[in-house]
Image (cartoon, helix red, strand yellow):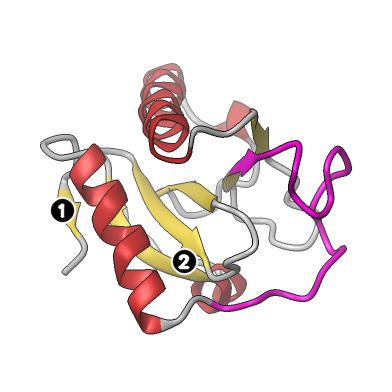
Amino acid sequence: MNQFSLHPQLQKDGIWAGDFELSRVLLINDSQFPWWVLVPMQDGISDIYQLDNCQQAQFWRESKRLSEALMDIYQGDKLNLAALGNMVPQLHVHHVVRYKSDPLWPQPIWGKLPAKPYTETQKQQQLATLQQALQGQWQTLAE
C-alpha cells in the first residue's frame, strides 16, 4: 500500500475522524464553523487531476458521502467545497457547512477570524456524530 504522511499543518489544525477507502477525514479545530477536510491518502499529490481515474471517482464518491452526512447533521444553508492548496500543498478538500446567520456569510472563511478550538467535550461530540452518520462506511473509526 502507498505510504502516507499528513502535511504538518493539517496535523496541527485537524482532528482525525476516520478513513474512507481512499481519504482521511479531519475535523478542523475551529468551533465557529462545521469544517471538515477530506485528504486522499496519497503522498506527492497536490491537485485532483494527479489522481488516476479510479482514484478520482473514489474521491468524489467519498466527498459526496461526507457532504451528505454533513448537511444532514448540521442542516446548513450551503456547503462550501474548496481545494485551495496555496499554503498547504498536499491535496485536501475543505467541506464547510455555512449558514446565512454565520459571522462571515456570504464571504469566504479563510483567514478572517482567529480559530476558536473545540473543548474536549465538543470535539468528542462532533466526532461521534459524524462517526454515527457514516457508520459502516469507514475503513477505520476514530477511537
Residue 56 in percent (x, y) is at: 46, 23
Q: Residue at x 38, y 21 (%)?
A: 61
Q: Residues within 10 Å of mark 1 (few under 14, many from 20)?
A: few
Q: Nearer the viewer, residue 106 or 60?
A: 106
Magenta span includes 110: yes
Q: Which residue is mark 1?
A: 140
Instruction: Give the mark nearer the N terminus: 1 vs 2.
Output: 2
Q: Main secondary structure of the magenta part?
A: loop
Which quadrant of the view contains residue 86? bottom right
Q: Is residue 101 left or right of residue 111?
A: left
Residue 18 in percent (x, y) is at: 27, 55
Residue furthest out toward the left: 136
Which quadrant of the view contains residue 98? top right
Q: Tell me, yes or no, if residue 1 can be seen here.
A: no
Q: Which residues are magenta?
A: 96-117
Q: Amino acid at mark 2?
A: Leu
Q: Residue at x 47, y 31 (%)?
A: 71
Residue 5 in percent (x, y) is at: 42, 66
Q: Regarding mark 2 in the picture, which secondary structure is present there?
A: loop
Q: Regarding mark 1 in the picture, which secondary structure is present there?
A: strand
**Label tally:** 2
Question: Residue 31, which numbered label?
Answer: none
Residue 51 in percent (x, y) is at: 50, 31
> How far apart, in angstroms, are the residues tagged by discs 1 and 2?
16 Å
Q: Residue at x 75, y 43 (%)?
A: 101
Q: Which residue is mark 2?
A: 6
Q: Tell me, yes or no, if residue 63 can be seen here.
A: yes
